[in-house]
Amino acid sequence: MPIEHLLNMRAIDAMIIRGGSSKGVYLDIADLPPAGPERDEAVLRIFGSPDERQIDGLGGADKLTSKVAVMGPPTRDGCDIDYLFGQVNQALPRIDWRPNCGNLSAGAALYGALLGKGRLEGDAMRIDVHQVNTGRVLRTTVPMLGDAPAVEGDFAIGGVPGTAARLDVDFGGFAGSALGGDVLPTGNARDIYDIPGLGPIEASVIDMANLLIFVRAADVGLDTGLSVNEMQADPALVNQLEAIRKVVSHELGFITGPDADQELMVSLNPLVFAVAAPRDYAATDGTSIRAVDHDLYARSFGRRAFSKAYPGSGSAGTAVAVGIEGTLAQEYCRNAPAPGRDYEMRIGHPGGCLSVRARTDLDTQGRMRVSKAEIGRTARLLMQGKAFFR
């Protein structure tokens, strides 16, 4: 139902869904104004932005919970539903409509299953999601119990308490989705960038589900023994990682010009991943994570903030990066795979561990091709009703 006027406020039908280790407000495109300032203004007010606490809206005062998904009928052949992602800024009256969110992608699959938009295959529903921001297709599978998505299960993901039913999201078709080119946008597995205040460092730039920059933790002075909150409290480290985002964005022509600093505070992309060899550490909930439990230690950073869990899109990109010879991610990955076979790798992140199934191949011209980047997620409907805003 379109935006109504109720109780001296505006009201819109909404769902709040936890997808993976993120949480978002899911809205029907038919209920919103067309894309543009009027739609942005409505979404910002629903979330209570701009305000770091988002106290007057549904935003959760964290980048993992300040996300919107605009859902609708498929506008691409062969798909079951459309999913448009928006990262709602907390500090600025801006929404980044360019990237994708891998965790909310799991919520988009659940949304489709709740509406019965897919096709049943045994005890699961197959839903092909048109990811509108990138124009790519997410291949998803949602377990069903009767005519509704299954809730209970024994699958756990880092950053989310307890266990639940596992659903799968495959990003295999997302190579080059951020810039429209190849999975290696520079053509190299690693390049050298001169970073102000840091000097020349090596980095691997991967365009896979989002735009990802991999650096060695040691090269940026990141102490892998610290908690993510302690890392966040180090202004020198935060400034260095933000400088890497700025320099690489400029070199790629992604974000340039006099307003680059502000645009980087709005844009989810690029994301920086500091990687190192597996090690023992404590997750944010105090759980002990052992070196033998993961294949790669990684910490995700973007818009001057470390992630308290791990981006779903970033996990797909990380798995692909370890399958590309010469990348910094592969350098530190235990039992790094070779192209041409399926593999599974485990990422150690602040929330715990997650695993990704992937496959990379070389085409007839010797270019890298991604055929699978599948992550297991859980998702749950938290609220269905009306969101009220002024």
Image: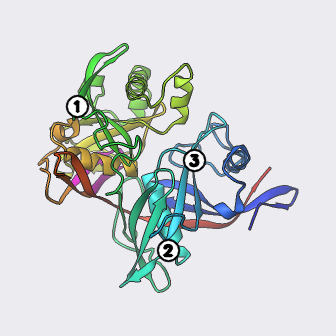
Label 2, label 1: how far apart the Cα atoms are? 40 Å
Identify the residue at image location x=21%, y=35%: 189
Identify the residue at image location x=34%, y=67%: 155
Query: Residue 281 occupies which quadrant of the picture?
Result: top left
Principal secondary structure, stretch drawn in magenta: strand
- Which of the two discs, 1 and 3, sits closer to the camera? 1
Q: Nearer the viewer, residue 78 or 310?
A: 78
Horizontal side of residue 376 vs 362, given as left or right:
right
The percent position of residue 249, horizontal first and vertical second, equals 42, 28
Tell me the crowding category of disc 1: few under 14, some 14 to 19, or many 20 or more residues within 10 angstroms, Cα based: many
| Residue type beneath disc 2 | Ala
The residue singled out by tag 3 in the image is: 66
The residue singled out by tag 1 in the image is: 190
| Residue type beneath disc 3 | Ser
Q: Quadrant of the N terminus?
A: bottom right
The residue singled out by tag 2 in the image is: 113
Horizontal side of residue 100 vs 377, given as left or right:
right
Magenta-highlighted residues: 345-356
Q: Is residue 127 above or below residue 120?
A: above
Q: Secondary structure at mark 2?
A: helix
Q: Is residue 296 above or below residue 107?
A: above
* Mark carried by residue 365: none
Identify the residue at image location x=52%, y=21%: 257
